[in-house]
Amino acid sequence: MPLILIDVCFNRFKDLMSKKTDKAEFLEREGRFMFICFLKPIINGTGFYYSEPENDDGSRMDLVITYNRKEYVIELKIWHGTEYEISGRDQLSEYLDARNLAEGYLVTFSFFKEKTAQEKPEWIEHNGKKIYEAVIDCGKE
């Protein structure tokens, strides 16, 4: 997916998820399911996705999208604090290394007051990788 399409996808998904306010039983797999449902019509016919594909070392990525012969690795997390956010970036960096990729995508679902959502997703550098990070505000506890 060209960068502009990813930017639009993340922002539109963020708008959709900001209307969700109930944290009850919301797990990363629900976030993955909702993100897949959102992306499916966009990638249909030109790309496909793998949910929880396994790397050679046995680790499992949340989502890999192949679009126009390019791979996009997406890690999904629920906000549980800064240390957990950093470990998510570390985890994504390891997945990118395993796939010989320089950039990946991190979606964090936030239900907490102490993590404010970004206005727009942004690129950050982490462990020598470029990570496009989006914090989705799903309502406050």
Image: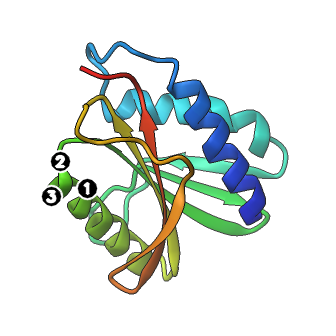
Q: In this view, does 91 lie to the left or right of 32?
A: left
Which residue type carries mark 3?
Answer: Glu
| Above-or-below relation of 38 to 19 | below
Which residue type carries mark 1?
Answer: Glu
Question: Looking at the rendered structure, which numbered label has been put on residue 81?
Answer: 2
> Distance between the Cα atoms at labels 1 and 2?
6 Å
Q: Can residue 1 be seen in this view?
A: no
Q: Do the residues labelled 2 and 3 touch (CB within 8 Å)?
A: yes
| Above-or-below relation of 41 to 96 | above
Q: Where is residue 44 in the image (x, y as percent from the top left)?
A: 79, 41
Q: Where is residue 64 in the image (x, y as percent from the top left)?
A: 53, 55
Query: Which part of the image, by quadrant, shows the C terminus?
Result: top left
Q: Can residue 44 be seen in this view?
A: yes
Q: Do the residues labelled 1 and 2 touch (CB within 8 Å)?
A: yes
Which residue type carries mark 2?
Answer: Gly
| Above-or-below relation of 87 to 126 | above
> Distance between the Cα atoms at labels 2 and 3?
6 Å
The residue positioned 70% from the left and 36% from the top of the image is: 40
What residue did someone put label 3 on?
A: 83
Quarter of image, res 13: top right
Q: Is residue 69 left or right of residue 129?
A: right
The residue positioned 22% from the left and 39% from the top of the image is: 114
